[in-house]
Amino acid sequence: MLSHLLIKGLAIIEELEIEFNSKLNVITGETGAGKSILIKALDLVLGGKSNSDVVRQGWKSASVSAVFLFDRGHPFVGIAGAHGIELDDGQFIIRRKISVKGRSQAWINDNPVTISTLKRIGSYLIDIFGQHDNHRLLNPANHIAYLDQFVSEDILGSYVDAYKDLTRLARAIVSDRRDFHRKHRDLDYMTFRYEEILTFGPDEQEFVDLTESVGNSKSDLEAKQLLLEARNRIDGQSDEGLSITSYLGVKRILEKVKHDGMLDRAIELCDEVTALKDELSFEVERYLSQLDVDSESIERKQERLSAYHALFHKMRARDIHEFLMIFEQLGHDINFVKEAEINFEKSLTEFENLLEVLIARDSALNKSRDKAFQLVSKRISRELNQLNMKGAEIFVDKSPYKKGESDDPSLVESLDSRLVALMQEFERFGPDGSNSIQFLLKSNPGEEAKPLSKIASGGEVSRIMLGIKKVLSADARTCVMVFDEIDTGISGHTASIVGKKLLEISKVFQVICVSHLPQVAVYGNTHLKVEKTVKKGRTESNITRLSKNEALNEIARLLSGGQITKSSLQNARSLRKESLEKSASV
């Protein structure tokens, strides 16, 4: 059961703590007082959607904390354990926090959990039924989901698994056939390109080595050319003017001149220049001889590297890695085309086998649904009679499944007749089976059963849903059932019957009911009143647990439409006496 609910900074709620009874808790209050915010708070505990709009103005965050008491035999315990959450003392706390920036966090017993985990765990704790469920009941597309709540999860799950498996295989087969037809047209071209690259024999390491080697060789060639030019200049073989050697004839000329010692230093300098020239020539030649440059080898490497780049350009590859990926993909595509027919036959055989499984499981599902409906239709019809819909009966109309606009279009775009036939057979099935389900209502004996949307009033829809919930409660896996204005569209004696039904459910499950009808509220084991006040210029919502006398006054207020009068108080006492008499028989 839900023991306490603590709300802080949520919408118009400043801070609110609510203590619940283990049976029927009724919540009343004027329109806009904040009853819907309580439902929102419970939804947040279950992992519902959130955004920054729920945070009270001026607050940095909103938070909701829910304290649950549990029995170790409840399915929730195993689910929590599977998520690493240890439960020791028969109590646990779920806390949800939403920041003003929209960030959402959740904890169970101070263990951080994801919102998806919270949703899964929450589905075993609280079942919220709101006014929107009335509208959902009028839409035939939702009826199969209501019926399936009475069907074995194993039977339903086995069909869903088979349908998913076959859907994946169907998509894979059709995708492969599309690829085959497209690639088969390009087979000759792909083969030519593949063999061209195969003959070339690309290798990633070779390309890396070539790139590095050619880059280094280019520097070596440039160095060799420069050194040869320097040597030629030294040795007088340059085409650019006089060389160093040509200047060395100066000594012979000077020696022929009578200089009386005046040119001795100049002649010495000539000897020094000659020695330096020889030393320079030796050093240049020594380095040149050590420079190992194989022009032919470099040329071969340059040609190989150029061939790589030519293939890159041809195959539209940016680098060696992408080029090799293209090469690998070409090989894969060629093998795919060559082996396509064999693989296609294998896939079709697998498809046929899975289709047989799907057909068998669909048959079992239909039988289970028929059996379930035969059982629950009687129970629901009995509940409707007790809910003042005398003679009303629920029927089910089955029709073959038809693909809608939201479903995948036909996947077949080839001329493979066997595939076309299998796909057409598969298209008879949908995610929920080979049949569509619609509930029909016969309001009175002798009348024709018609779709709910055409004959059911708002009050009738509310009672039908309550009847379904009452029947469902026998096998429900949740521990708390929340009804948000289940009594919409009803009044008087019928409302009193609804209150009694809620009390019946509360004998098995904790029930929290938001109501605006005194005939329902009077059955509450605990009566909570929501009021809106203004404090320090700000609107704030508060909730009060009413005493017996306070609850009687609230019933009187509801009866009179706002003001408590003597007659409304007398009527409230009569309602309470009547509810106590009826409660005794529950």
Image (cartoon, rainbow, N blue to C red):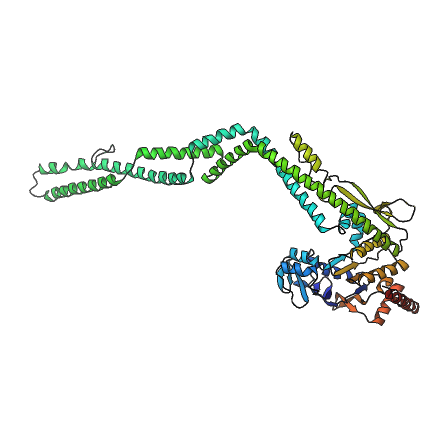
| Residue at x-position 26% and y-position 38% | 227
The residue lying toward the viewer, choosing from 98 and 138, is 138
Residue 203 is drawn in which quadrant? top left
Q: Is residue 226 visible?
A: yes
- Residue 316 vs residue 233: left or right? right
The residue lying toward the viewer, choosing from 520 and 211, is 520
Q: Position of residue 570 (x, y in %)?
A: 92, 68
- The correct choice, above or below, for 143 with respect to 551 in the image is above
Q: Position of residue 544 (x, y in %)?
A: 78, 69
- The correct choice, above or below, for 253 with respect to 450 in the image is above
Q: Quadrant of the N terminus?
A: bottom right
Q: Position of residue 255 (x, y in %)?
A: 9, 38
Q: Quadrant of the C terminus?
A: bottom right
- The correct choice, above or below, for 345 with respect to 395 in the image is above
The residue lying toward the viewer, choosing from 227 and 434, is 434
| Residue at x-position 46% and y-position 40% | 321
Residue 521 is drawn in which quadrant? bottom right
Q: Is residue 406 visible?
A: no
